Amino acid sequence: MTVISEADILLPENVDMRKWAVIACDQFTSRPDYWQRVSDYVGSAPSTLHMILPEANLKTAGNEAGDRIRKAMEETRSLLKTYPSSMVYTERTMEDGQIRRGLVCAVDLEAYDYTSGAASPVRATEMTVPERLPARQKVRMGASLELPHVILFCDDPEMQLIEAVSDMKENLQVLYNLDLMEGGGHITGRLVSHEQGAAFFKALSAYMKRIDKKCGREGLSPMYFAVGDGNHSLAAAKACYEALKAEGRTTERSRYALVELENIEDPVHVFQSIHRLVRAEDPMALLNDLKGRAGGGEGGYPVTWYCGEESGCIMLDQAKGDLAVEVLQDCLDAYAEKHPAEIDYIHGETELADLARAPGHIGFALQPMDKRQLFPYVIRHGSLPRKTFSMGHAREKRYYMEAKEI
């Protein structure tokens, strides 16, 4: 099983790349104004915006959304140049000046399993919500192209895998080099040809052997890669692939999905919390319910709450779960089963507090997870609760750039 491979990567020619690249569809879900600004800026220009469905628009999107997206893909295909058997080395300069390095490549969906407790080489890091897959599957099934915003993590403290490519970057052809819209920072992408990729695959083999040895000592099934972002998008790709396989209609293109590979050990990666915003008939009743279900004393998990102009801190009982997000999410889900309540997931505590000022809303701010807990936790316990962590702030998420035929 190859797990990671090259792909026939597609990129546009002779288009305005600032309008082409838009942020991942699962960002700014409570900010339709963000997506309206993007739409106004892009207009009718060639853009990945026309080939995705922002989650902020899920409730208002009609049944024709899938047809519109597929038509846009077909109309855009003639603008795309194919780079056969290749990868793309990326450098993303963040707002604070730090550089995030990655490698756009393909992951074998046969090596990936998003179910909790999976022992596959590639695993999900958060619990997959089945109800969130159909909308994504509906867009993907019958689509001619895929646009990736999935981040795949390796756990490489030796810093040898991505570096096998970054060390030769001066010899790589620059494919794009631009400032991203809406404060997304700067990004440069360089072509890694089949010949140039040999050094990476040599390092990949050594990396996988190290994981095999480490997991073998502990009697655990090796996990080489973990999905750091875009869990539900990759799960939808897997579900579509399995559906095609059941019908005997799979191809090499449908078996692989584009991702960006990054190293969790890179100092640039800092996990940020994903906070909870709840719309409820009686927010304070929800808060009291939370205190009754999981309130603890000193030494508990601290969670800050915001409601209107009020705020405070509740300590959650550590005996209720291994992570604060686990305890909080279980309590909110239990409340929502018996009371009208809608849970949203917010990046950034300032934005959470602002949104929680609206009548009928309450926000819960969580402390960030230690990133070094990720691989050990998933290997031993399975996937984390949904929306446990985020890599960086909302504007630092991956922008759609490359494409692949499926």
Image (spheres, helix red, strand yellow):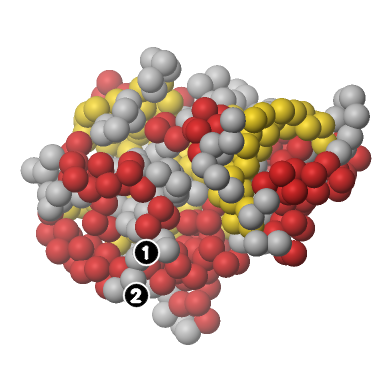
Q: Are marks 2 and 1 in contact (CB under 8 Å)?
A: no
**In the picture, which quadrant includes the N terminus?**
bottom right
Instruction: State which quadrant residue 252 falls in.
Output: bottom left
Instruction: State which quadrant residue 63 falls in.
Output: bottom left
Label 1: few (<14), some (14–19) or many (≥20) C-alpha neighbours in 10 Å: few
Q: Position of residue 133 (x, y in %)?
A: 52, 65
Q: Position of residue 389 (x, y in %)?
A: 61, 38
Q: Position of residue 179 (x, y in %)?
A: 24, 27
Instruction: State which quadrant residue 42 falls in.
Output: top left
- Answer left or right for 400 relative to 362: left
Name the residue: 54% across, 63% down: 132
- From the image, tell me which residue sits under label 1: 60
Residue 63, label in figure? 2
Name the residue: 42% across, 63% down: 59
Query: Label 1 sits on what residue type?
Result: Thr
Residue 120, label in figure? none
Q: Nearer the viewer, residue 279 or 137?
A: 279
